[in-house]
Amino acid sequence: MNALPRFSVVICNYNYARFVGEAIRSALEQDYPADRIEVIVVDDGSTDDSRAVYAQFADDPRFTAVLQDNRGQTATYEAGVRRAVGDYVCLLDSDDRFLPDKLRRVAEHIAGLGEAPDRLFLCHDLWLDCTDADNTTSRLPQSWFDLVSVTELPDCLTLEQPVTHFPFSIPCGLVFSRTLVLDCLQALPTWEFNRGADGILCPAALIRTGRAHYLREALGIYRIHGANEFASIVDGKYVPRFDPHNRAPKTQRFLEHWLDLQDKTPVERMQALQYLRGREHLVRRLSATHRLGAPMVAVAVLGDADDPATQASISDSLQSHEPVTVAAAGADGDTELMRLARAWAGHSAEYMVFLRAGDRLDRSFVERHLFLRQHGALVAASCSDIRLISAQGSLVHADVFRNSGAWKQAIQQVPPLATSLRDWVAPPMAGCMLRRNVLLDRLFAHAPLAAPALQAAGFWLVMQFAHHTGGVLRFRETLSSSRLRDGAAASYGYLSAASSADGSLIQPPVAEAAAWFAGFYQQEQAVLRQWLPEAWHRRFAEWLQAHRVPPAAGTQPGS
């Protein structure tokens, strides 16, 4: 851009007649060419003398007043930005003001950045002035960047850097490309974020662009006058008047949806998800007073690390829960059971999720599974509903088991030995999470000696073992996407049956599995008796007989 950029200053006002005139003058009296400035005041249904103030500037062709019914700060800024024609938009609350050299210094700084004209997101520093009841003003020694610790950050904030609570400026210190801020504001549900627009607008812009530039000069005044909604001065110090925890859930929900709308590469999407995960954990921490730790969870993607489908599964399956590792488990020529065993041995996490390459977890998958486990039944495995996506990546069905009629209850516990090996109570692999225990450790230790049919039916065997030793918890909440394999029919029959890691249906090796269970029991009796109650052992003998397998030694009641 060869000519000096044109700036649109959008001022939000609601019943601040005593301040809004200063705000307007501070925008019009800039040390910057007058023909490159427009000032738009949007009045959000004021009932004081604000309109009389606007009349004082009616003769200035650069000034426009827009009147609307009361809709809140975010909607007010959106209305102003829609009217704007400048290359860049500067926001300004009506009780704050700009310093005279703001636009000039911002234009000079932008010229040196080399940023795309439609992707600029810039924050500059501010002075904090305290105005008391006698209209006497004093300035705090710390600037805004000092208070929010921007002084400790690099000149360009990116999604890869550690997440802090609010590493941005407030409205009078924000500068955006007009197209960028308009896109963000138009996407916002203004009825949910009617106040504190900067709290949602800034992270939305950061996710969109991937970076926020800092201009480390105080070019505006944040006025604290006793009636501010979000700030006060106590004993000469700045004290916030809001709790970010209160709005955090809906902010997080919007930002997740916002990210889904962005056209990003897998790497960029992964960085944005990591940012969201870190941001969520600033306001969602376990109680330190009880010294509770967060369980470690591992997600093993059964695919080659260089395969694009595996990379997509990893980048799209990052979790809000922390700590979670998501990594490729390899796609060597091993049998399915041995691939699972290798992945199991490669992690010491308390919980394990196996994922086919091409499938993906919603970012709340682990968090929701853990919540229902920690507040519901104690089980070895938990299963959630899945959405079905085509091999090309389009949505086929949003909630498979909710609508199948097979899962009749919203939350259902299936106890050990309640069904036979001929029954399959689990969804595809992408909907299941296993809790590590010594019995599953022993199962995988036996894996190399399993019969070929069991080697091929690896996940089926693992889930049957987890089910019949520790039980299963099923819940109709869709938390993952399962990719329909090429050639597979989108049917309840297909999705409700056991399948291999490549998606093809398997004929469950019931006889081989029952015999294997009997042999496992005989070899691991000491471990089983240490960790399973006597009632289980009695039922197990009957369960084996139902499969027409002679009871293994020690399975008779009272033995």
Image (tube, rainbow, N blue to C red):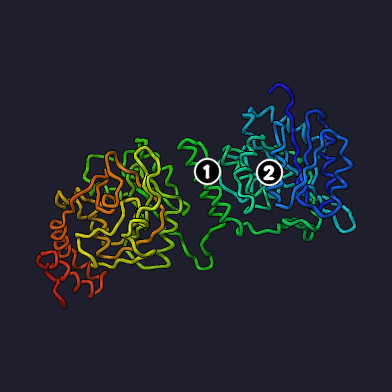
Q: Position of residue 308 (x, y in %)?
A: 37, 35
**Whether residue 327 is visible:** no
Q: Position of residue 437 (x, y in %)?
A: 30, 61
Q: Position of residue 455 (x, y in %)?
A: 19, 49
Residue under pointer 2: 78
Q: Is residue 334 above or below residue 449?
A: above
Screen quadrant of the C terminus = bottom left
Query: Is residue 393 rendered to the left or right of residue 290?
Result: left
Residue 55 found in image quarter: top right
| Other-residue count near label 2 (Cα within 10 Å), few / some / many at <14 / 14–19 / ≥20 | many
Q: Callout 1: helix, strand or loop?
A: helix
- Front label number (1 vs 2): 2
* Residue 180: numbered disc: none
The amino acid type of the residue labelled 1 equals: Leu
Q: Which residue corresponds to the image point at 62% horizontal and 48% vertical from the top-left?
A: 200
| Other-residue count near label 1 (Cα within 10 Å), few / some / many at <14 / 14–19 / ≥20 | some
